[in-house]
Image: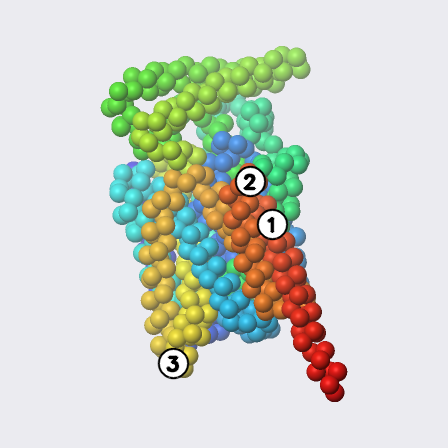
Amino acid sequence: MHPLDWSVIVLYLAWIVWDGVRRSKATSEVEGYFLAKRSLPWWAVGLSVMATQLSAITLIGTTGRGYTDGLGVVQLYLGLPLAMVILSVTAVPFFYRAKVYTAYEYLERRFDARTRTLASLLFLLSRALSCGVIVAAPAVILSIVLGWNLTLTVLGIGLPTVLYTMVGGVQAVTWTDVKQMAVIVAGVGAAVVVLALQLPDRLSVGEALHLAGAAGRMQALDFTWDPNRTYTFWSGLIGGLFLMLSYFGCDQSQVQRYLTARSVDEGRQSLMMSAYVKIPLQLLIPLIGVLVFVFYLFHQPPMLFNRQHEAEVLASARGEEYRALGREFDAAFGERKAAAEALAAARRTGGAAEAASAASAFRASEARVAGVRARAAGLVREVSGDQAFGDVNYVFPTFVTERMPIGLVGLLIAAIFAAAMSSIAAELNSLSTATVIDFYRRLWRTGESDAHYLRVSKLATLVWGLVACAVALFAADLGPLIDVVNRFGSFFYGSLLGVFVLAIGTRRATARGAFWGLLAGMAAVALTASYTAIAFLWHNVVGAAVVVAAGLAVSLADRRAGSRRAAPVAGRR
């Protein structure tokens, strides 16, 4: 990589850490450290909300998904605008006026301490896992660029973020998020421009997208009613709605964002900003993956983007078989390139019949390329024993490091770092908040000074940062990262949403009903994930529905038992 690119990355990291550390003002009190004394403007909170969710997983995993599968991944966000409207009306005013530090504090007020403890514990588990996946995403980048040991790359990414989050608290998280969103948008825009400029001379952007459409990459909506398919219109609209309601309404990493706003109205504005600004950006990111696919129609791609085991396979007894696949791949690429050029020419000058024939030939050549890649990946799995081997997460990093112009490589890697660090910082800050407020201050040391709790908070940030780094060491090989992080979240989110529906939505729910309903919801999701092929987005619906149903059933039994116990007393009177 060119020294100019390294300079961009080093300057970015130094700038972000310096800016985060200097935001330590007004953090000598617990409310200032965790909630910025509820003084932040709506636009900064809104950008922080967006930056927290738009992690490096989005830039790496979603672009990889766009390359392999097309725009269908955008269906994950169909429920986002509706969820933000619902939460703006319900959760934002409710939590803001409750004057809580964590969302789970209210569960103790409404139910009891064990329901609060269980809900907060589930949050800590889910966020620690998700944070590890977020750390893993940029570690993929450095492992490609530098060939470093994965442990070193993970620590190199996680520790600077831990540093400024420990020192600056939520103020540092929010204001560095604002700057990081600017870097992310600049990086995404640069990638789109470079991809458009690197199309063949006679190929317009419209023709490029038509080629992608002929290969099935432009289908954004799938109306198939199949609960086993991950991304469909229905899973995104219904399952995605439950996921977004859970994430933005019950997850401390998001609730804490709008609790820092100056007022209820500004908290609402921050969510609505995320609802309608983030959707176009979220569509643009998989579109980059689609454009990378078009780029590699005309420029030789590697047979496999993930070259982690390539040397091992080539040195094995099956090395010649792998080389033969490489030669077959080169020939198949040549056929696909010719077919793509023929299809583009047919659309410009030929009739409908000629274009249809050219499209059929192009699809057949694309299938041959995909078939060779699949066999090569299977061979790598057999030789290496790495059954989780895949290369979706390596597509965009490979394009950036091998095909982007000097200077822009550094900008794109800085954008991926920015996306990762903004999410990691928010997660660590919320994990620290829940640890101190829901556990340490409530259960162990109840009467200490703010200075004491701040020291513990900073220690908790460090500990959770190390836990996230440990999770990251295996998360990169679990599959497409955008799926992994949402799969982790969907295991917990629906059940947490269900218990808050019981708390806020009905007065009939009892403490015992909420607690056992929450356990029932988690058990139902575990059984669904283990014994069915239902896509993970639907797990959010399953968890919420079971918690509400079981919670109301136990609450009804409690009320009936209470009525029976009270009846003799009333008779004696």
Residue ID for mark 1: 542
> What residue appears at the point 61 percent right and 47 percent down from the top-left corner?
239
* 255, 549: nearer the viewer: 549
Three-letter amino acid code at disc 2?
Answer: Thr
* 331, 384: nearer the viewer: 384
Residue 361 appears in the figure: yes
* 380, 285: nearer the viewer: 380
Q: CA distance from mark 1 to mark 2?
A: 12 Å
> What residue appears at the point 49 percent right and 31 percent down from the top-left corner?
68
Residue ID for mark 3: 449
Indicate the secondary structure of the residue bearing disc 1: helix
Q: Residue furthest bottom?
A: 573
Q: Residue furthest left?
A: 315
103 is higher (above) or lower (below) than 539? below
Q: Position of residue 90 (x, y in %)?
A: 65, 64
Question: Which label is found at residue 532?
Answer: 2
Indicate the secondary structure of the residue bearing disc 2: loop
Three-letter amino acid code at disc 1?
Answer: Val
498 is higher (above) or lower (below) than 411? below
- Quarter of the C terminus within the rendering: bottom right
Cβ–Cβ under 8 Å for marks 3 and 1: no
Indicate the secondary structure of the residue bearing disc 3: loop
Q: CA distance from mark 3 to mark 1?
A: 43 Å
